[in-house]
Image (cartoon, grey):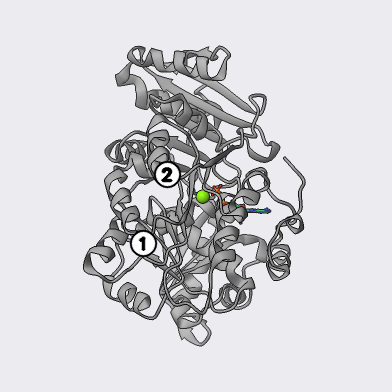
Amino acid sequence: MTSESFSSLPISSAQIANLDSLGYKQMTAIQAQGLPYVLQGKDLIAQAKTGSGKTATFGIGLLQQINPRFFGVQALVLCPTRELADQVGKELRKLARSTANIKLVLLCGGKPFAPQKSSLAHGAHIVVGTPGRIQDHLSRGTLTLTGVQTLVLDEADRMLDMGFFDVINEIIEQTPDKRQTLLFSATYPSSIKKMCATILKDPVTVSVESEHTDSVIEQTFYQVKSHQRNQALLSLFAHYQPETTVVFCHTKVQCDEVARFLHEHQIEALAIHGDLEQRERDQVLVRFANHSCSVLVATDVAARGLDIKLLQAVINFELPRDPDIYVHRIGRTGRAGEKGIALSLYTEQEHLRVKAIEAYQNKPCVIATIESLQTNRGVPIQSPMVTIQLDVGRKNKIRPGDLLGALTGDAGLSGSQIGKIDIFDISSYVAVERSALTKVLKYFANGKVKGRSVRARKID
Ligand code: ADP
Ligand code: MG
């Protein structure tokens, strides 16, 4: 970790003050390495793992270039999924606070087209979105990219995995040749190299090695027969009893099946993958983050960019073919000096994948047998909290304080029984201790929030 301050950069003092107010005291390693080049206008390839601060690395740069008086799209950020685009949009809006009147529009699929069209018609400086929807806007003539100065490909490896190569190229063709292109990726496979060669000009490459060292992540591999996988998974949970876990699967179908299987065996697990509706995804993430669900079963794509803190265990239900992906998956545990556990199931046929990981990490993998696990400690992994959904939200001018007030006041809960509160447009989610559930539901049967009666239900 370098300890350089943002004030060493050629950026406005308003931005430096803004960064300070956001609590960004020092640059992260990728920012310290990348930002000087970005601010010089160079093309950049930046490789660093999730959570390393890549958004600000391009965000600070592209904002510096924007002319608020020109109402055209000057920066375009392509992201693989809606969720990631949302996260990038949020971060850019925070970074843009130092500059007056900058308009950012999110263009993602799964949302109605008309409001996006009218936002664009009113003039947008920055567009953040997914390739499919951006291409839609281009083909309908509702978006022009001729004024783009900065083009960002965020999570480029994921976008290629998702088959966006052609679409991305078509989008890029509509941007000026004279532009700055910044490409961010957590891994650097050959497909990315190929893409970089065609769309970047004389790029600088910066890369930050994963910060976790192997001593923090305990990695163990278990060879199983393919019909034993489910049972082996239960044994892992029984032995390790992790409080928070992500189980990685290859396919959406597999995610659903594994989550269902765990659920049938008293382990609260939720699947997350690209087929979920936005509302369902929101619910899953809310419940995992507020500790009312302790296991997430995810595809690589869906797990990307999730800002999950303190993950105790990562389980590979199957090993990925690419060791790079393995290392990236397990890097989600053992953060911030906490010890993490990485457990992998593999079959004899997948043996070569273990070999590839050994070669990549340059050390032997620890192999153990399922039989060596202690499974008699009993499974049910019950989360400490439950989530209550309320049918009021931002549109009803509800704020977290209103809900907290109602629950600690009239409903008679103590503050410590209430966990995370998430407010969405037309609904809100409150985590409460399991033991307080009945009290809360009883309260909402008659009680009010801001003088309005509210419908409440436990989600499961
Ligand atoms: P990445 O894109 O590399 O996965 P993000 O850009 O989403 O990472 O940043 C991860 C988190 O770190 C975000 O919550 C962001 O607000 C925060 N962050 C970024 N830069 C800094 C910094 N210099 N100091 C403190 N926090 C930062
Ligand atoms: Mg990112």
- In the picture, the disc for residue 279 is 1
Query: Does 225 sit left or right of 105 as displayed?
Result: left
Residue 53, percent from left and from top: 60, 49
Identify the residue at image location x=29%, y=62%: 110
Residue type at tag 1: Arg
Residue in the foreground of this view, choosing between 301 and 265: 301
Q: Is residue 327 above or below residue 431?
A: above
Identify the residue at image location x=60%, y=33%: 210
The residue under label 2 is 156
Q: Is residue 14 above or below residue 292?
A: below
Picture mark count: 2
Query: Does 120 sit left or right of 420 as displayed?
Result: left
Q: Earlier in the sequence, mark 2 or mark 1?
A: 2
In which quarter of the view is residue 296 placed? Answer: top left
Q: Secondary structure at mark 2?
A: helix
Residue in the foreground of this view, choosing between 400 and 333: 333
